[in-house]
Image (cartoon, rainbow, N blue to C red):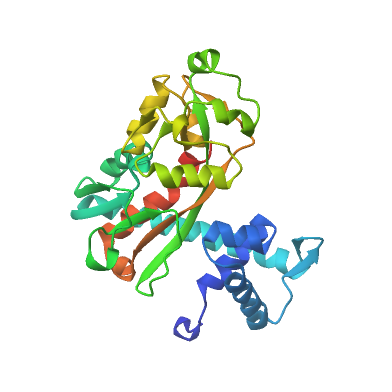
């Protein structure tokens, strides 16, 4: 066979593989960090290229056809081979040197990044990482950072983004504080609660009242100008704090308050398009994409 004449689109094969493993286009799109229509077009293009139907719709899910099942074994083997190539290539990471700047919110910088950077030190000790801990949106186009962890999808054409997780936040307090405070069983009970404030407390109050929580300035006896300090104030028993559920559930000194109240927000990895040709940035990007979901999900 003349291998120079063989053409194959691995993106289409990967779209098929992940869709088969996840059981639906929507779940596969989330896993791959792409839109459902884009994923659907890739699967359809592969079906057209091969001249077979790979999936049948059953209810809200998808099941493999006979042809899809036969192809699945081959594509899974290709996926395992691709992973092996990646592992082999990662051996070269020891030789890659240079600086990579990561910007993330203050709470993510102090909670999520330390264990990830510990892994990076083993993988690529020649890479120096600068953490820009800030709740402000840094401009990646002006190289204020190489990689950003954001809670909004990038809308600039020169940036690429990958949805890596869905995070959830909630109220937390120490058992001692809850024993001393008025009982909090419903959102209405927050009218008598003590809550740790945030730097932009007017917007914080507006966000809470917009969700039907009857709070005023009087509910905030302490205001912290950074989220990590806000969290430490809650851990010290000064009132209710708001933070990621993954962080709160892992803290034995804190207790969830009003579990039905949940703040949902996506977690995106964002970088300039030159990421694709920058080995050291790519190594950090891949490690973040691989490890962030497990750390975020409680």
Question: Where 58 sits versus 8, above or below?
Answer: above
Question: Where 103 sits versus 170, above or below?
Answer: below
Instruction: Say which quarter of the image contains residue 45.
Output: bottom right
On the rendered structure, is 159 left or right of 3?
left
In the picture as drawn, the residue positioned furthest to the bottom comes out as 5
Residue 70: horizontal and vertical position, in percent? Answer: 70, 66
* Residue at x-position 51% and y-position 61%: 33
On the rendered structure, is 4 left or right of 77?
left
On the rendered structure, is 70 left or right of 128?
right
Residue 172: horizontal and vertical position, in percent? Answer: 50, 28
Instruction: Tell me if I can see residue 155 in this picture.
Output: yes
Camera-side residue of 142 and 279: 142
Camera-side residue of 64 and 297: 297
Camera-side residue of 117 and 202: 202
* Residue at x-position 33% and y-position 32%: 229
Question: Where 242 sits versus 19, above or below?
Answer: above
* Residue at x-position 65% and y-position 56%: 21
Camera-side residue of 96 and 98: 98
* Residue at x-position 46% and y-position 56%: 83
Residue 135: horizontal and vertical position, in percent? Answer: 33, 49
Instruction: Tell me if I can see residue 291 in this picture.
Output: no
In the picture as drawn, the residue positioned furthest to the right comes out as 59
On the rendered structure, is 228 left or right of 253?
left
Number of numbered discs visible in the structure rendering: 0
């Amino acid at each position: 066979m003349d291998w120079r004449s063989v053409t194959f689109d691995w993106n289409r094969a990967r779209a098929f593989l992940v869709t088969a493993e996840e059981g639906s286009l929507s779940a596969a799109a989330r896993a791959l960090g792409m839109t459902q229509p884009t994923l659907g077009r890739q699967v359809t293009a592969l079906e057209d290229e091969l001249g077979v139907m790979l999936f049948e719709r059953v209810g809200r899910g998808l099941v493999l056809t006979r042809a899809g099942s036969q192809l699945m074994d081959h594509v899974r083997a290709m996926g395992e081979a691709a992973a092996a190539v990646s592992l082999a290539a990662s051996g070269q990471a020891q030789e890659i040197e240079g600086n990579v700047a990561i910007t993330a919110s203050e709470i993510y910088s102090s909670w999520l990044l330390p264990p990830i950077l510990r892994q990076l030190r083993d993988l690529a000790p020649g890479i120096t990482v600068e953490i820009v801990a800030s709740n402000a949106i840094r401009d990646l186009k002006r190289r204020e950072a190489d990689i950003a962890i954001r809670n909004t999808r990038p809308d600039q054409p020169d940036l690429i983004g990958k949805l890596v997780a869905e995070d959830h936040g909630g109220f937390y307090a120490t058992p001692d504080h809850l024993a001393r405070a008025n009982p909090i069983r419903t959102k209405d009970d927050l009218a008598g609660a003590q809550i740790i404030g945030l730097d932009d407390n007017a917007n914080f109050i507006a966000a809470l009242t917009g969700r039907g929580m009857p709070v005023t300035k009087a509910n905030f006896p302490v205001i912290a100008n950074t989220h990590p300090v806000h969290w430490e104030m809650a851990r010290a028993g000064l009132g209710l704090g708001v933070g990621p559920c993954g962080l709160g559930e892992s803290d034995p000194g804190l207790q969830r308050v009003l579990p039905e109240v949940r703040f949902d927000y996506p977690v995106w990895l964002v970088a300039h398009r030159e990421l694709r040709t920058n080995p050291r940035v790519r190594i950090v990007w891949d490690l973040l994409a691989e490890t962030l979901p497990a750390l975020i999900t409680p």
